Structure formats: structure tokens, C-alpha cells
Image (tube, coloured by chain):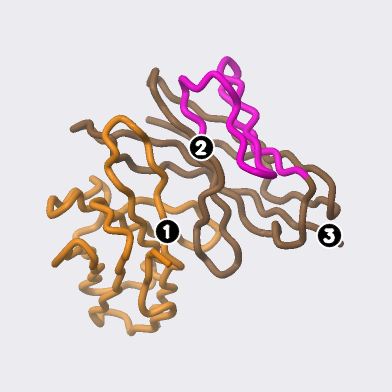
């Protein structure tokens, strides 16, 4: 089945230790998104890629970076995780259909714990 | 700025009954779209239904229907014949276009409603 896969599902890191979260997709969608969802809150967009073009949200901290080496994979790098970065990180994809709006497909998320 | 309001932090419904989850929105855009997503405890966001602002009829998808009242800026989700598997967090979200246009967009989510279906 075509899908969005996130690894790992659970990640524990130490305060200040860099961590990378992975997202892959078999949908061949050209847009990939990273959302941060803190406990009992709504998901919030961090950034997205349209093909190779990276688009950062204005309020995304510099501590968060992303890479997209090819259509299928996208990575979220947190350079120096703080306690406030503990959250669920959701990867999503969508296809540019021109005038037609298509839904975003989400992965299962990676729950990040910072000790 | 766009805003989504879900006023019900939690809702309870008996199995096989219908339930309505409220969503109101605020936008100055003429063209917009509203989504409902379901998030079980496993964490994955599951797309349920979409309503475009110019769609003349209310959207329906199986047991899900969207009660879209444009003048009141509300887009309530109706789940008919609730099942135990419907227990989850439900998010209303609005499509917000990026400044450079195009058909891709970001989602602005409400705070969600936790639905519990009782047997």
C-alpha cells in the first residue's frame, strides 16, 4: 500500500544532543511537510518542501532544519534539542494537482522525548 | 490571519447514535477550504472529509457529513451511527494558501475534540 512512513516511532534524546527524524513516502507526492504537535495541542507547520524548494515558516526556530535528498525521503534535524522540543513530529505529503485541492496524507508520527 | 475554533474539548456518544462536532472559522479569504481529520491514540492523522468554500452542496463521505453554513462560518462534522472505533481526537483544519500561490497549502488546525464512543 502506498503510504507515509516515519522512523523511528519513538525517539529519546538528551538535552542538546542532535537528533534526526526520518520520513519516507511511496506516494510520489511532490510536497512534503513537517508539523510539530505538542501534548494536547494542535499540529503546527514547521516547514515544507515543494520538490526541492524549501519553505520555512517565519516562526520556526533556527534549531530546526530539514533535508530532502530525493522525492521519497525527507529528514527533520534538531540541532540542539531543548526540553520544549519534546513533541510528536508529523510528516505529511500532498500532490500538486493544479486547481484541484488534494488532501494531505500523514505518517504515524515520531514521538520525541528530551531528557 | 486564519483561525479555527473547536469549542468542545470532549464529547461522549452512545454507540450507534449520531454526533455533531463543532467547528467555526474566521478568514477574510473568498476562496478557502475546510478539512476534518481523525487522530487515534496511535498518532496518525486520518483524512475524513473536505469542503471547499465554493462547493454548493455539503460534503459527505460514508458515515461522515459536513454541515457547512457559510454565513455563520461554521463547518460542523456529523458522524452517523457511531462505532467504538470512532473514539479519537478530531481536528478541524483550514487550508491556507502560501503567499506565492499554487495549489499546495498549509493547514491551520483547531485544538481538537476528543470523542469517546460508549458501548
- SS label for mark 3: strand
Q: Which chain is orange?
A: A
Q: Residues within 10 Å of mark 2 (few under 14, many from 20)?
A: many
Q: Colour of chain B?
A: brown
In which quadrant will I find the N terminus of chain A? bottom left
In which quadrant will I find the C terminus of chain A? bottom left
Q: Which mark is residue B118?
A: 3
Residue A104 among those drawn in magenta? no
Could you tell me residue B42's position as x and y percent?
56, 70
Chain bearing mark 2: B
Q: Which residue is mark 1?
A: A106
Residue at the spot x=79%, y=47% of the render? B81
The vertical placement of B31 against A98, above or below, is above
Residue at the spot x=19%, y=61% of the render? A71
Chain bearing mark 3: B
Residue B57 among those drawn in magenta? yes
Q: Report the magenta residues as a range.
A: B51-80
Amino acid at each position: 500500500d502506498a503510504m507515509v512512513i516515519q522512523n523511528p516511532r519513538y525517539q529519546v534524546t538528551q538535552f542538546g544532543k542532535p537528533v534526526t527524524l526520518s520520513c519516507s513516502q511511496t506516494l510520489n507526492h511532490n510536497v512534503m511537510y513537517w508539523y510539530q504537535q505538542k501534548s494536547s495541542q494542535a499540529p503546527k507547520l514547521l516547514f515544507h518542501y515543494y520538490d526541492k524548494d524549501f519553505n520555512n515558516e517565519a516562526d520556526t526556530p533556527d534549531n530546526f532544519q530539514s533535508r530532502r535528498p530525493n522525492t521519497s525521503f525527507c529528514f527533520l534535524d534538531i540541532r540542539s534539542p531543548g526540553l520544549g522540543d519534546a513533541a510528536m513530529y508529523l510528516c505529511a505529503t500532498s500532490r500538486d494537482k493544479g486547481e484541484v485541492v488534494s488532501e494531505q496524507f500523514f505518517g504515524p508520527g515520531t514521538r520525541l522525548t528530551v531528557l | 490571519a486564519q483561525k479555527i475554533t473547536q469549542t468542545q474539548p470532549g464529547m461522549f456518544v452512545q454507540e450507534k447514535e449520531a454526533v455533531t462536532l463543532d467547528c467555526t472559522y474566521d478568514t477574510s479569504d473568498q476562496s478557502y477550504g475546510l478539512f476534518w481529520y481523525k487522530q487515534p491514540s496511535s498518532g496518525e492523522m486520518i483524512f475524513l472529509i473536505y469542503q471547499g468554500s465554493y462547493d454548493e452542496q455539503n460534503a459527505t463521505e460514508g458515515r461522515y457529513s459536513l454541515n457547512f453554513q457559510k454565513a455563520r462560518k461554521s463547518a460542523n462534522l456529523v458522524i452517523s451511527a457511531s462505532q467504538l472505533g470512532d473514539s479519537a481526537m478530531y481536528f478541524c483544519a483550514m487550508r491556507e494558501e502560501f503567499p506565492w500561490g499554487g495549489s499546495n497549502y498549509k493547514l491551520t488546525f483547531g485544538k481538537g475534540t476528543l470523542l469517546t464512543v460508549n458501548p
